[in-house]
Image: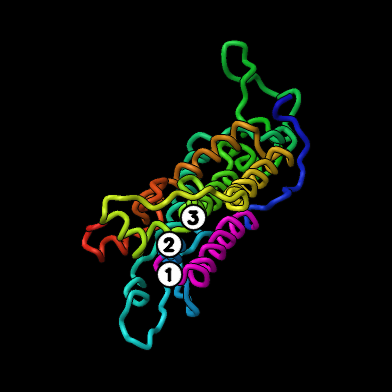
Amino acid sequence: MRHSGPYLSEYITTIVSAVVSFAVPAACMGAVALWRTRRFEDGNAAVGFVSFRFVPALLTCPPYPCFALHMGSRQGKNAWTRLTQEQLIGLGYALATSTLFNSLLKIFIGSLRPHFLTICNPVNPPPFPGRGLMRTWYTPGQVCTRPAGKVKEAQMSFPSGHASAAFAGFGFLALWINARWKVLADGGRFRDHDGTRASAALASGGEVMPQRVHHWKFVLFVTPLCIAFLIAGSKVRDGWHHPVDVVFGALVGTLFAHWAYRMVYRSVYDWRTNHIPMVEAREEGGKIE
């Protein structure tokens, strides 16, 4: 039967999934932004935090807190200190909003987990007639013998929260990697499409010379997606979700990853602007075309 599978321990628990889906993309984007591109705007817009002094914002759904960051500057107020107001953006948007959306679907729709009958342990046969024309329909509260809390949790299979969080976090990271290394574009680094070289080319009516995309960049781009697939697929393997739960959760996470990325960067797939944070665009007075 579809809902009579054995109860197995989770391969990846909810806490581990939450921490990995937030911490790994945040660490990757923060490290690249601060050490490779030397642009704090990239890391701040993407991660929504970074500093050596963390102040919890407490404005998102746990376990995805967003952190405000204060970074001192020897020159006083500069781009780093002005960007401390840019909280709850990027990765925090994707994870917090997809988690909220996913939780509402679980509460108001839900479905039976593959191991529901094992958790329910129903009375068989029931000592009283059921509902419906044939008197064979029973509610979990009528026939289940296990604690009500566990029975309720076993009815929250749809959609998969692990898949939603994984594709929201690692999907956002994949979009960010694409913008940094222009995987789905003409190749090259984002510096080749920004700054003096790109400005001179575009001002003269020309374009930046396209480059062949190296294979290692493509591998780098799909690695976060592979991790997301592994996290999501583990919920089918351990019998906690049906395949449709995982697929829908992945779609929810992917959708919110795209929306969140567009909220903090000028575009998602346009190679000319998908590496430019909205903060920088506002400071330039919207002159970027």
Q: Which stretch did the figure color magenta?
A: 16-41
Instruction: Rate crowding at label 2 as few (under 14), some (14 to 19) or many (20 or more) other CA atoms within 10 Å.
Output: some
Q: Quadrant of residue 44?
A: bottom left
Q: Are marks 1 and 3 in contact (CB under 8 Å)?
A: no
Number of marks present in the image shown: 3
Near-viewer residue (152 or 129): 152
Disc with the residue nearer the chain's start (1 vs 3): 1
Asked if the stretch drawn in magenta spans residue 53, the answer is: no
Residue 133, x across and y down, in percent: 57, 11
Residue at left offset 65%, top offset 19%: 129
Disc 2 to disc 3, how far (Cα)? 8 Å
**As displayed, is residue 56 above or below residue 106?**
below
Q: How is the image coloured?
A: rainbow
Near-viewer residue (222 or 103): 222
Residue 14, x across and y down, in percent: 63, 53
Q: Secondary structure at mark 2?
A: helix
Asked if the stretch drawn in magenta spans residue 39, the answer is: yes
Q: Secondary structure at mark 3?
A: loop
Disc 1 to disc 2, how far (Cα)? 11 Å
Q: What's the residue type where badge 1 is placed?
A: Arg
Direction top: furthest residue: 133
Q: Which residue is mark 2?
A: 191
Residue at left offset 40%, top offset 61%: 88
Answer whether residue 149 is visible to the viewer in this image: no
**As displayed, is residue 202 above or below residue 230?**
below
Q: Are marks 2 and 3 in contact (CB under 8 Å)?
A: no
Q: Which residue is mark 1?
A: 39
Q: Which residue is mark 3?
A: 188
Instruction: Rate crowding at label 3 as few (under 14), some (14 to 19) or many (20 or more) other CA atoms within 10 Å.
Output: many
Residue 185, x across and y down, in percent: 46, 46
